[in-house]
Amino acid sequence: MIMKKRDLFDFDTVLERRGTASLKWEKYKEQDIIPLWVADMDFRSPPVVIRALQQRVEDGVFGYTITPDALNASVMKMLRTQYAWNVKPEWLVWLPGLVTGLNVACRAVGEDGDDVITAVPIYPPFLSAPEYSRRNIIKVSLHEDNNQWQFDFDRLEESITAATKLFLLCSPQNPVGRVLTIEELTTLAAICQQYDIVICSDEIHCDLILDRQKYHVPIATLNPDAAARTITLMSPSKTFNLPGLSCAFAVIPEKNLRRSFKNAMAGIVPRVNAAGYTAAQTAFEEGADWHAALLDYLRGNLAAVEQAIHQMPGLSMAPVEATYLAWIDMRATGVKNPAAFFENAGVGLQDGIEFDAPGFVRLNFGCPRSLLEKALDRMITAVAKIR
Ligand SMILES: Cc1ncc(COP(=O)(O)O)c(C=O)c1O
């Protein structure tokens, strides 16, 4: 048998993360609850990244660090090869996180009291960022049609007010796992052009496409107008499992928008740390084999989740096209508090209420298959007892 390079990576070992100050695992410390909630994966980062960090630590000097030119070059190369997107180095603004980027975008665009629009259900910081920035939030619901989550473009347009200055887009979408098509993105961009709305597009999950028929298109690459009105947020943190190293970036081609964004950051947003830069550069330059192996592993995990959901009467989910997150509809079971229900069964999921969708739960399947199967078995047993 020929061993593929990708078979060399280990995603099966169950790591002991209790007692490591892990946000995900400390939530249930000393409880027999398998945490499948916050979006980090229970895998070690790519070996090349670990080696690069070891070498960086060996240097032993951790002074203030600026963005390495080589990192800007590797990001530009990645955007050019993956998305045919030719980005200039000055368009890149480095950040300690995407959530920081969402909040800075809300402060950088418009004035206090303006409206920010987004589609729900949505990753919770989209809901808090406008409020933290003294803006109002307008929420437009996605709807499920033909077992697929869709935008309601008419409703979106009707909901736009004269004070709507910013659209917060999540593409691919967390939690519903959609990869938005060129047609959908084109319609969204056209609406934003018509009403002169800036787009902040969180594309953190863009390299986690599980459906082989789908591909990610950055909304800023559609046409020059979309490029000029978009702040694109990206990071290696989800793809290469580096969220604790706090390294992300914005791509802002239009200079006035970029200036407003940088002004809103000034004096508040810290530099990216030295380890984050090292990890990001190595991941982008040398992480491809690990990334391909990860996607295969996640596809296997997704199949296990789908199979288990079929065995749970009253539970359903639309196909997950991207992300390692399953968005599960529990409403037909009549269970009032689904997250508490599964915690009682020994599985920690994220409550749909946080995403503006009561009756749903979000399950993170980025973990060793054996751990996932154990959690799914617990869920099947619990659901079988619902009367
Ligand atoms: C859509 C989305 N944006 C942002 C983040 C978090 O980004 P960061 O850790 O860089 O702030 C997540 C993490 O789950 C996410 O799913």
Image (cartoon, rainbow, N blue to C red):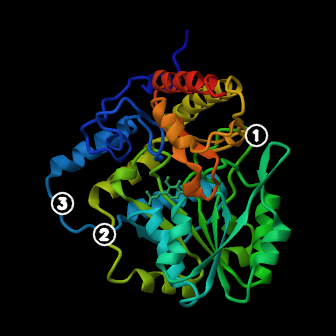
Residue found farthest to the left:
60
What residue is at 74 percent from the left and 58 percent from the top? 142
Callout 3 secondary element: loop
- Give above or below for 147 relative to 163: above
Residue 28 visible, this orientation: yes
Crowding at dot 2, Cα within 10 Å, few <14 / some 14-19 / many 20+, comes out as: few
Q: Could you give the CA–CA distance between mark 3 and mark 2, rounded to whole angstroms?
A: 12 Å
| Residue occupied by mark 2 | 66
Q: Amino acid at mark 1?
A: Gln
Q: Are marks 1 and 3 in contact (CB under 8 Å)?
A: no
**Does the beta carbon at disc 2 come under 8 Å from ligand 1?**
no
Q: Position of residue 194 (x, y in %)?
A: 80, 82
Q: Is residue 295 left or right of residue 33?
A: right
Q: Nearer the viewer, residue 255 or 161?
A: 161
The structure residue drawn at horizontal position 35% and vertical position 51%, both measured from the top left corner, is: 244
Mark 1 surroundings within 10 Å by alpha-carbon count, few (fewer than 14), some (14 through 19), many (20 or more): few
Q: Secondary structure at mark 2?
A: loop
Residue 15, percent from left and from top: 34, 29
The residue tagged 3 is 62
Earlier in the chain: of badge 2 and badge 1, it is 2
The amino acid type, in three-letter code, at marker 2 is Ile
Res 190 seen here: no
Viewer-nearest of discs 2 and 1: 1
Q: Which mark is residue 5?
A: none
The picture quadrant where one finds residue 269 is bottom left
**What mark, if any, has residue 213 been given in the picture?**
1
